[in-house]
Image (tube, rainbow, N blue to C red):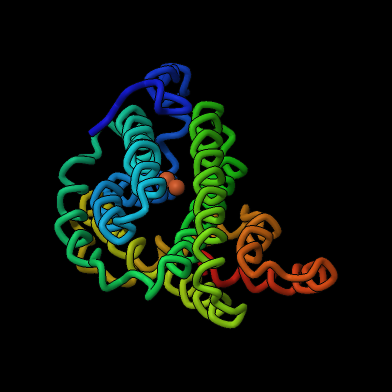
Amino acid sequence: METDKTVLPWRIEDIDLSQIVRLHVAINEDLLLLLCAASFIESGSDLYTSNLSTFFDGDLEVSDWLKRHWENEELQHGRALKAYINYVWPEFDWDLGFKHFFDEYSKTCSLEAFEKSWALEMVARCVVETGTATLYRAISEYSDEPVLKEITDHIRNDEVRHYKYFLRFFKKYNQIEGNNRFSVLSTLVRRVIEIKNEDLEIAFRHVFSIRYPEKVYSGACMHNKIARVNSLVRTHISADMCVKMLLKPLDLPAKIQPILQYPLAKIAQHVFFR
Ligand SMILES: [Fe+2]
Ligand SMILES: [Fe+2]
């Protein structure tokens, strides 16, 4: 794995975790669940990169960027969140939770889960980056702890930049493939619906079983906690930003976009983190 510091736009090692007022943050169990679930998914990114690189094998620009930038940045997101969790909740066994998560998660990542063409897979990537950019912005808005704000702002900037790369790659491929708006829209809608389901569900389950081993068999208890975390995110979500990003691949005429913006923002608020 490449860890050349010149490759990363920021470094978790440069952030002073000792500025965190530990006891103030540590009482927030919802935050632990949320950060941990996010850190597990981010930390599984290397598996995804190798699948993506295989899928885009033949386009050196894309596979090179994925390997040299995207993967390192996503893995740093996982490391940064893990460092924060270890500092605030040192009793939480992150490594064990991640091991259990990864055993299950790795079985769900396969090449079959990819879209049927390069352009449409780039649409799917745009949806994922929109989801993560929206999530980290919401965490930053929610938190009143400066170090977490700093970390999540850095991560959000990375996710927005990833989105811009994937959007550019989509346009490049779509000039060749010529997918119409309907195919792009149906990919967008399907991926938005899928976005939270499986990955987050697996992550939450494994965080939960480490944090509350005595309640692991109580589905209702876990369901309640996940609902609380989702509502925390939903309350701080920037639906406008999210919808603007989602609509870009459709390349809608300038007159239509503002008309769709408001109703879609309302829908997005309910679809993401419902
Ligand atoms: Fe990320
Ligand atoms: Fe990303």
The foreground one among 257 and 89 is 257
Residue drawn at the location 49% of the way across and 38% of the way down: 155
Q: Position of residue 130 (x, y in %)?
A: 54, 56
The one of 97 and 47 positioned closer to us in this rendering: 47
- In the picture, measured across the screen, residue 6 lies left or right of residue 212, that is right
Q: Which residue is situated farthest in the right direction here?
A: 255
- The answer to which quarter of the image holds residue 213 is bottom left
Q: Is residue 119 above or below residue 147?
A: below
Q: Which residue is at 62% across, 78% downward?
A: 181
Please say if 47 is above or below 71.
below
Is residue 112 in view? Answer: yes
Labels in figure, total: 0
Looking at the image, residue 267 sits to the left or right of residue 272; the answer is: right
Q: Residue at x 27, y 52 (%)?
A: 207
Residue 5 located left or right of residue 153:
left
Q: Position of residue 107 (x, y in %)?
A: 17, 65
Seen from the viewer's position, the closer of residues 240 and 125 is 125
Q: Residue at x 29, y 27 (%)?
A: 3
Q: Position of residue 49 (x, y in %)?
A: 29, 50
Query: Looking at the image, can residue 139 be seen?
Result: no
The image shows residue 139 at horizontal and vertical percentages of 54, 45
Q: Quadrant of residue 109?
A: bottom left
Viewport quadrant of the N terminus: top left
Q: Quadrant of residue 70?
A: top left
